[in-house]
């Protein structure tokens, strides 16, 4: 683990509050998993308590064990269980009970399944939309080993945002990610999503794992060439001593610089960038809600999202 003391800007409050307790109870009753819990997200208390809007939880589909072993991630690897065929309906029921108007769906990697879980994603999206078409759904998908038809299957289900994370710059894909992942493969997923008609595409990049500025700049260029609409930057935090070390703690001013570069130089519709930003931490949600639900212009939506503190 990094010996450097965490700076003041990385302090977070403990998860608590009535709203937090209600959401946790709803999830446990249905035996559902969230990436908030499995990945030990530092923003869980704020998101679940609804401090920046309606309470938000990112549902993690297809179990709590992953077929891959990325060195930054706290989700357990191996011991894959059969899919729960009732999970799409359970998630839709939980969304209704909690009262969410923007839902983020993500999953573990399931390389062991014939369709790698693409059909399960599609069913869950359709179950949510069937109950309430006004709910906005973001699908944060695995790479499906780069199989375009599987990405297209998820897009066909009608998510409002199709997200897939490149995680880091090209040089650091290994050791940051599992060797079965890859930079070009992830770019192809995002390109396929755009070509298949996803309304918005989104990705996330961690800083603090040893990247150089010119590599981040190159990644932004590559992502924009792939027609990605929304990009987020956040600080990598080591989940345990057995995970990848933190190379450095990036100052908030640097994150702000990358936000300006992404939006003003490369023309991304929106960039959320800050030490505590995570790919599913209302980062793109407020922007998409303002554009899709409220009919605001890109400039107005961007300003409103940034004013909320991302």
Image: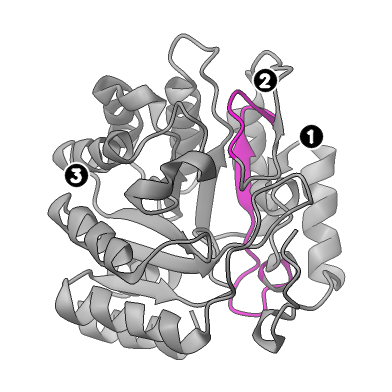
Task: Indicate which label's residue lies in the foreground, 3 or 1.
Answer: 3
Q: Distance between the residues labelled 3 and 1?
A: 33 Å
The quarter of the picture where residue 261 lies is bottom left
Q: Residue at label 2? A: 84
Q: How far apart are marks 2 and 1 (CA)?
A: 10 Å
Horizontal arrangement in the rendering, residue 158 relative to residue 263 (left or right):
right
The residue positioned 74% from the left and 17% from the top of the image is: 79
Asked whether residue 199 appears in the rendered view, the answer is yes
Which mark is first along the chain, 2 or 3?
A: 2
Q: Mark 2: which secondary structure?
A: loop
* Residue interval drawn in magenta: 47-70
- As drawn, the residue found furthest toward the top would be 114
- Asked whether residue 48 is drawn in magenta, I would say yes
Q: Mark 3: which secondary structure?
A: helix
| CB-based contact (under 8 Å), mark 2 and mark 1 | yes
* Colour scheme employed for the rendering of this structure: one colour
Task: Indicate which label's residue lies in the foreground, 3 or 2.
Answer: 3
Q: Residue at label 1? A: 31
Which mark is first along the chain, 1 or 2?
A: 1
For residue 223, the mark is none
Asked whether residue 308 appears in the rendered view, the answer is no
Which x, y percent locates residue 238? Answer: 69, 57
Magenta stretch: dominant secondary structure: loop
Does residue 273 sit above or below 163 in this rendering?
below
Callout 2 crowding tier (Cα within 10 Å): few <14, some 14–19, many ≥20 = few
Which x, y percent locates residue 230? Answer: 31, 63
Q: Residue at label 3? A: 194
Which x, y percent locates residue 242? Answer: 76, 44
Which mark is first along the chain, 1 or 3?
A: 1
Callout 3 crowding tier (Cα within 10 Å): few <14, some 14–19, many ≥20 = many
């Amino acid at each position: 683990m990094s010996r450097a003391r965490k700076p003041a800007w990385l302090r977070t409050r403990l998860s608590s509050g009535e709203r937090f307790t209600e959401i946790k109870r709803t999830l446990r009753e249905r035996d559902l998993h969230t990436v908030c819990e499995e990945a030990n997200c530092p923003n869980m208390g704020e998101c679940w308590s609804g401090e920046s809007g309606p309470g938000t939880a990112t549902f993690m589909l297809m179990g709590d064990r992953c077929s891959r072993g990325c060195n930054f991630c706290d989700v357990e690897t191996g011991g894959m269980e059969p899919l729960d065929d009732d999970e799409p309906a359970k998630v839709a029921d939980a969304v209704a009970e909690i009262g969410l108007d923007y839902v983020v769906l993500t999953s573990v990697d399931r390389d062991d399944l014939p369709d790698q879980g693409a059909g399960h994603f599609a069913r869950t999206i359709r179950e949510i939309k069937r109950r309430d078409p006004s709910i906005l759904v973001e699908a944060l998908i695995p790479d499906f080993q780069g199989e375009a038809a599987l990405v297209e299957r998820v897009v066909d289900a009608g998510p409002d945002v199709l997200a897939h994370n490149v995680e880091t710059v090209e040089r650091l894909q290994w050791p940051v990610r599992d060797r079965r992942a890859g930079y070009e493969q992830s770019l192809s997923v995002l390109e396929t999503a755009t070509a298949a008609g996803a309304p918005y595409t989104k990705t996330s990049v961690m800083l603090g794992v040893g990247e150089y500025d010119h590599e981040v700049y190159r990644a932004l260029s590559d992502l924009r060439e792939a027609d990605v609409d929304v990009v987020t930057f956040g600080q990598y935090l080591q989940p345990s001593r057995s995970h990848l070390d933190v190379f450095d703690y990036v100052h908030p001013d640097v994150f702000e610089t990358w936000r300006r570069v992404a939006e003003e130089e490369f023309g991304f519709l929106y960039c959320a960038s800050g030490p505590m930003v995570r790919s599913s931490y209302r980062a793109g949600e407020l922007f998409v809600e303002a554009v899709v639900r409220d009919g605001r212009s890109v400039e107005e939506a961007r300003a409103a999202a940034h004013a909320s503190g991302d």
